[in-house]
Image (spheres, helix red, strand yellow):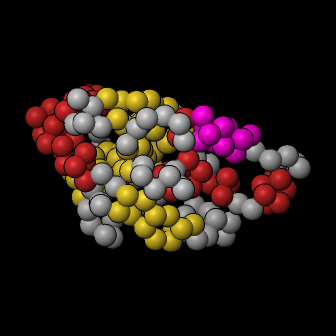
Amino acid sequence: MGEVAGAGLLAHVPTIMLPEAARRELNHGQDTSLLAGLHRLRAQIFKLLDYATVLVLDSHWATTAEYVLSAHDRRAGPYTPGATPTGAHPVSYDFPGDPELAHVVADRAEGAGTWITAIDDSYLPISYATVNLWHFLGRGLPDKRWVSLSVCQTGDSEDHLRAGRALGEAIGTLDRKVLLVASG
């Protein structure tokens, strides 16, 4: 039986990907405290906690008529964010996915009365709300899987609650511990 091993709301502000000198210039000579927090979170949670998959509720991945969950065996490539292309380009990412989790979530969503579609299209976009957090929290941890869930921009409160219930039920049916990260 699976479980949610932890959950959190984390910032992913694009400026964390800038070189240190640029970050300090933007912040009156100081570096952002978010970096120290992410380094601490990696050392104390992401490197030590027993979990298999990180599921990112990605606030910058907006879909129109459904929720979409990445269902790739692996996601890799260069990423340049559209929001800050001059400062953070390209960021390389490479991590295993969790297609089994994605498909079980999609199946549970159907029974919960909402649409979550598991997609493994190699051209499916990825956003910096996932890439930035993986860069600091998951990079170098090759046995940890990462998947992203979009936000259905036409969903209402009840749709979001149904999607959350489907996530919880799906995780509970698998032999896996999952970290939920709302990247906001």
Magenta segment boundaries in residue numbering? 33-44
Is the magenta region chiefly helix, strand or loop?
helix
Give the left or right position of residue 10, taking residue 123 as reference: right
Residue at x 64% of width, y 65% of height: 88
Magenta highlight on residue 75: no
**Residue in the foreground of this view, choosing between 66 and 53:** 53
Give the left or right position of residue 113, taking residue 55 as reference: left
Task: Give the quadrant of the N terminus.
Answer: top left
Residue 163 to residue 24: above or below: above
* Residue 55 x, y percent position in the rendering: 38, 43
Give the left or right position of residue 86, taking residue 97 as reference: right
Quarter of image, res 168: top left
* Residue 72 x, y percent position in the rendering: 29, 60
* Residue 76 x, y percent position in the rendering: 43, 67
Magenta highlight on residue 38: yes
Give the left or right position of residue 128, taking residue 65 as reference: right
Residue at x 45% of width, y 38% of height: 181
Q: Residue furthest left?
A: 111
Residue at x 85% of width, y 46% of height: 30
In this orientation, does residue 63 appear?
Answer: no
Quarter of image, res 59: top left
In this orientation, does residue 133 appear?
Answer: yes
Q: Residue furthest right?
A: 29
Residue at x 61% of width, y 70% of height: 89
